[in-house]
Image: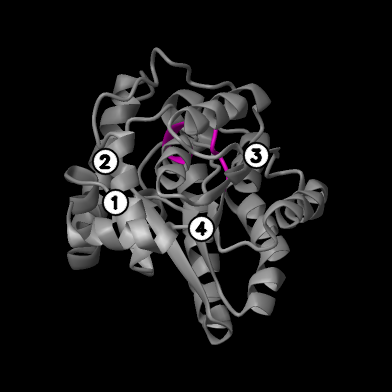
Amino acid sequence: MNDNTTKGNEFFKDKVVWITGASSGIGEGLARALAALSSKVVISARNAEELDRVYKDCVSQGAEKADILTIRLDVTDFDAMPKAVEEVLQRFSKIDILINNAGLGQRSFAVDTTMEVYQRVMDVNVMGPIALTKAVLPIMIEQQSGHIAVTSSIAGKIGPPLRSGYSAAKHAIMGFFDALRAEVAFHGVKVSTLVSGVVKTNVVANALQGDGSAIGPEEGLMTEGLTVEEAVEIIVSKLSLEEDEIIIGEGQEVQMMHMKQKDPVAFFRMLEEMAAAQLHSAGKS
């Protein structure tokens, strides 16, 4: 066990941590990890059945039933958020950490993507986290403490082809939370952006195509990148250190982010070649 892990164990003990998108992937992994670190964990998602499964898994691993609260919540249902916040406060009296993890991908050429798909991607990835953050923020300001995190993406730093909607959303959420960080520091509230690379989750399988249909598990199978456990270990360690921006990834996608910073012209030409190859593969060239 390294020093950062030890600090993380102490940092999260008895903290009230609310995780959205907690029914699968990184959100589920965070719920399990933080429950094991003796946090009081609030898990939210749309799928009540999957939430119940995560709840039972956390309890079976030793978490106290009273320390895990499940709330069925669609992050695009802004009217439901005050009630959800009140439910958390009734159980735990405070909110120490909010992890805005719910997200929705998109994989399609812009010319083929409907405005309805763009609207849905922006609502889930941008407006949802903003709305829940605004609902929780007054509580943290009153506490004079708190930590708000959001799962962005390396696509929020670069603009890869086939991800025009997703990249736009992740750029937007990076901008909002960077600005928020500056505004709330005076109140003792921290903000972290989680800049995720490729992680082996179902995010691609659930991503929307241009017509709004999901890619599906066969074409969206993730075989590369970090495991969920590896990603969660990074997030937990870095959140315990209250880092502002947390890079979660390795390999090509991280190198691409650095390449854009060092040589943007060469980077843009590379993306054009990538897009041309994808057009050819799709029979559009």
Q: CA distance from mark 2 to mark 4?
A: 23 Å
Q: CA distance from mark 4 to mark 3?
A: 35 Å
To which residue does mark 1 refer? 234
To which residue does mark 4 refer? 14
Q: Position of residue 30 (x, y in %)?
A: 43, 43
Frontmost of labels 2 and 4 is: 4
To which residue does mark 3 refer? 120
Amino acid type shown at disc 1: Ile
Amino acid type shown at disc 4: Asp
First-in-chain label (3 vs 2): 3
The quarter holding residue 204 reads top left
Mark seen at residue 214: none
Magenta region, residue range: 19-27
Q: Are marks 1 and 2 in contact (CB under 8 Å)?
A: yes
Q: Secondary structure at mark 3?
A: helix
Q: Is residue 73 left or right of residue 270?
A: right
Q: Nearer the viewer, residue 104 or 107?
A: 104
Q: Are marks 3 and 2 in contact (CB under 8 Å)?
A: no
Mark seen at residue 230: 2
Residue at x 23% of width, y 29% of height: 224
First-in-chain label (1 vs 4): 4
Q: Position of residue 154 (x, y in %)?
A: 34, 51
Q: Is residue 209 visible?
A: no
Q: Nearer the viewer, residue 18 or 192?
A: 18
Q: Secondary structure at mark 1?
A: helix
